[in-house]
Image (cartoon, helix red, strand yellow):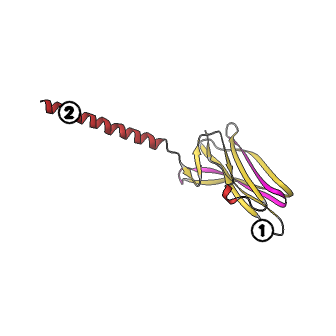
Amino acid sequence: MKKRILSIVSSVIVLCFVFTVSIVDVQAMDNEVIQVDGSYLTTQDTSIGKSPSDILRGEYLMDGECSITKAGRNRIYVYAATTADSYVDYVAAIIYVDRYNEKTEKWEQIDNWMVEDRDTYFIATSKTITVDRGYYYRVHAEHFAGMDTEPLEETYSFTDGILVP
């Protein structure tokens, strides 16, 4: 009788341990952060992307950055800038706004534009865009700077995706 009670108690302890481990694993899977094409899907109000430092510090191009911010119902504010090391013949940025498609699990471009200037060291652009609610949005940009007599230097930047509820 004593062995039987000890066996039942041991079985109950083992079952409790198994259920506890299973619940912890399921919660960890629910809290996983999803990354698509370098961008995490977040619920933040804003996200800022800067050009990678390992491909910068060229002769002309200093850095590039972009950002996305919730700007009210159905609206996002997009910003991008390119900075050269000094005055150059040409500075530019191409800005892309993407929406995440959950069915294809890919980013799809919904808007883009370009800003460029000559004989300067800095350009910036911003735009408020009306978007559909219930999707993740991100910004990525290509940045260029250089002299007319040489190939342009280029880099990129991208933000994480932010949810517009």
Which residue in the rendered view is the most extreme toward the right?
Answer: 119
Q: Residue 13 in the image: state x and y as whole percent.
A: 27, 34
Q: Which residues are magenta?
A: 75-104
Front position in the image: 59 or 134: 59
In this picture, is 90 found above or below 69? below
Is residue 107 visible to us here? yes
Q: Amino acid at mark 2?
A: Ile
Which residue in the rendered view is the most extreme toward the bottom?
Answer: 149
Label 1: element kind: loop
Lower sequence index among marks 1 and 2: 2
- Mark 1, other Cα within 10 Å: few <14 / some 14–19 / many ≥20: few
Q: Residue 144 in the image: state x and y as whole percent.
A: 76, 60
Front position in the image: 99 or 37: 37
Q: Quadrant of residue 112?
A: bottom right
In this picture, is 122 found above or below 130? below
Q: Residue at x 59, y 40 (%)?
A: 43
Q: Residue at x 81, y 52 (%)?
A: 123
- Pick the quarter of the image with the C terminus: top right
Q: Residue 5 in the image: state x and y as whole percent.
A: 17, 30
Q: Residue at x 83, y 55 (%)?
A: 121
Label ID, residue 151: 1
- Pick the quarter of the image with the N terminus: top left
* Residue at the disc numbered 2: 8
Label ID, residue 133: none
Q: Amino acid at mark 1?
A: Pro
In this picture, is 19 found above or below 57? above
Q: Residue at x 75, y 61 (%)?
A: 58
